[in-house]
């Protein structure tokens, strides 16, 4: 499906300078970063802006969003099935959208069930896997399972051609790079000696002398039924190995495709910046395209102005003199006014130090991506589509 031409679109070879141009040129945007930096809200805001101004069908796939974000998108039922955001919500926010905004939340268990439906060689194998207790735990709870299925779901939706742009909020992981490696790990697992070893008892029903001591001890600790479930699960799963290996390779190709770009979201606090720097380096090492770095909660630019520095210093140095006029105008005690003026001036100078440090960090992070966007502190949480569009507008400017 070809997206309608838009004013922000760039032709092949043109330099991308804004997030609007970046989203117009790509089909998949993957938002990533450490927890608590606003990557989910950023993904939703960019999706809303793309639908409003670029046209076409835009899908935002989020991972366990806060309820306020689901409310902001106007969604009561927020799950694995894509749901369209009502165009009336845009109108209420003062915007007439050129395209459509759709949203979905990754349901790990349902996505795994759908995957089994597609890959199981027959109905009998399908039912046996879905009813296996080990499968229930792996598909619903394991972190690596969550990482893989997020990328698998992305590939499935993109391959369908239903959407012109897909914006993905990546899974919360202990290591920010885990979801990138998940498809390759899945392929390696199906080709591994471990899988052959786990399925050998179910295939042969005769344990080798080497494995018998292990199973004897494991049987006493875990129980024979648990071991049988493990053997049955991996034996059944292996029947789908060729399909999984093929899909894992396809998912990896999708991530490296020129139509896919990555968006690293961070604040300028020390820990998130280190995580962002690590992630940027990993993307570069893998040859994956880093389209943008988004920096949230950045101090305003006026704090760095030289003229404002002089004003703040004079306010501190001449607080007693200035306080006389303010005290007369407000009916206040001159000493109290002077103390407030000194505090204001000193606070401004302290914030200016932080603002200058943030600018240096921004310059460091700007070396690799096409675009660096900064977002100031917002006075309140984003609770509706209008809030997402305000955030998106700040990002695009």
Image (tube, rainbow, N blue to C red):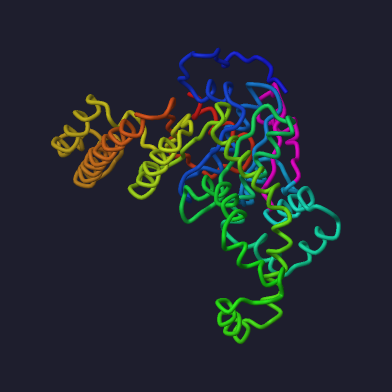
**What residue do we see at 13% from left, 36% from top?**
317
In the image, 170: left or right of 153? left
Q: Position of residue 42 (x, y in %)?
A: 54, 38
33 to 122, vertically: above or below:
above
- Say how many tags the image has: 0
Q: Position of residue 2 (x, y in %)?
A: 70, 20
The reply to whether the magenta stretch includes residue 225 is no
Judging depth in this view, the residue of 166 and 333 nearest the camera is 166
273 to 102, vertically: above or below:
below
Judging depth in this view, the residue of 190 and 372 nearest the camera is 190
**What residue do we see at 48% from left, 34% from top?**
288
Q: Position of residue 112 (x, y in %)?
A: 71, 54
Q: Quadrant of the N terminus?
A: top right
**What residue do we see at 26% from left, 42% from top?**
347
**What residue do we see at 69% from left, 43% from top?**
104
Q: Position of residue 310 (x, y in %)?
A: 19, 28
In the image, 45: left or right of 374? right
In the image, 125: left or right of 322? right
> Magenta part of the protein: which range?
81-107
Spot the residue most to the bottom.
Answer: 220
62 to 368, vertically: above or below:
below
Spot the residue most to the right.
Answer: 123
Q: Quadrant of residue 122?
A: bottom right
The reply to whether the magenta stretch includes residue 101 is yes
Q: Quadrant of residue 352?
A: top left
Judging depth in this view, the residue of 165 and 124 nearest the camera is 124
């Amino acid at each position: 499906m070809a997206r309608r031409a838009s004013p922000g679109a760039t032709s092949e070879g043109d330099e991308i300078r804004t997030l609007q141009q970046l989203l117009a040129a790509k089909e998949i945007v993957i938002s990533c970063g450490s927890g608590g930096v606003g990557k989910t809200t950023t993904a939703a805001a960019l999706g809303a802006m793309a639908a409003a101004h670029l046209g076409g069908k835009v899908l935002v796939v989020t991972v366990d969003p806060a309820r306020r974000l689901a409310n902001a998108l106007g969604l009561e039922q927020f799950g694995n099935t894509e749901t369209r955001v009502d165009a009336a919500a845009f109108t209420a926010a003062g915007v007439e959208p050129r395209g459509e905004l759709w949203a979905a939340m990754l349901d790990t268990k349902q996505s795994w069930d759908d995957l089994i439906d597609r890959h199981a060689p027959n109905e009998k194998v399908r039912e046996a896997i879905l009813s296996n207790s080990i499968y229930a735990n792996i598909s619903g709870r394991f972190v690596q399972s969550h990482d893989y299925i997020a990328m698998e779901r992305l590939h499935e939706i993109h391959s369908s051609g239903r959407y012109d742009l897909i914006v993905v909020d990546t899974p919360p992981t202990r290591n920010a790079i885990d979801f990138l490696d998940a498809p390759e790990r899945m392929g390696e697992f199906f080709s591994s000696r471990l899988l052959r070893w786990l399925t050998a008892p179910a295939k042969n029903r005769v344990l080798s002398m080497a494995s018998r001591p292990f199973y004897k001890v494991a049987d006493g600790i875990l129980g024979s039924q648990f071991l049988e479930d493990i053997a049955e699960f991996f034996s059944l799963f292996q029947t789908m190995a060729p399909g999984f290996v093929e899909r894992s390779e396809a998912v990896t190709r999708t991530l490296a495709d020129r139509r896919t770009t990555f968006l690293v979201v961070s604040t300028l606090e020390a820990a998130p910046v280190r995580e962002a720097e690590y992630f940027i380096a990993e993307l570069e090492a893998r040859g994956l395209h880093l389209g943008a770095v988004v920096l949230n909660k950045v101090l305003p630019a006026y704090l760095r102005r030289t003229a404002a520095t002089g004003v703040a210093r004079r306010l501190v140095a001449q607080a007693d003199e200035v306080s006389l006029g303010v005290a007369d105008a407000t009916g206040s005690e001159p000493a109290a006014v002077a103390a407030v003026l000194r505090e204001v001036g000193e606070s401004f100078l302290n914030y200016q130090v932080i603002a200058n440090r943030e600018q240096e960090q921004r310059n460091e992070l700007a070396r690799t991506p096409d675009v660096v966007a900064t977002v100031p502190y917002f006075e309140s949480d984003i609770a509706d589509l209008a809030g997402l569009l305000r955030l998106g507008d700040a990002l695009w400017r």
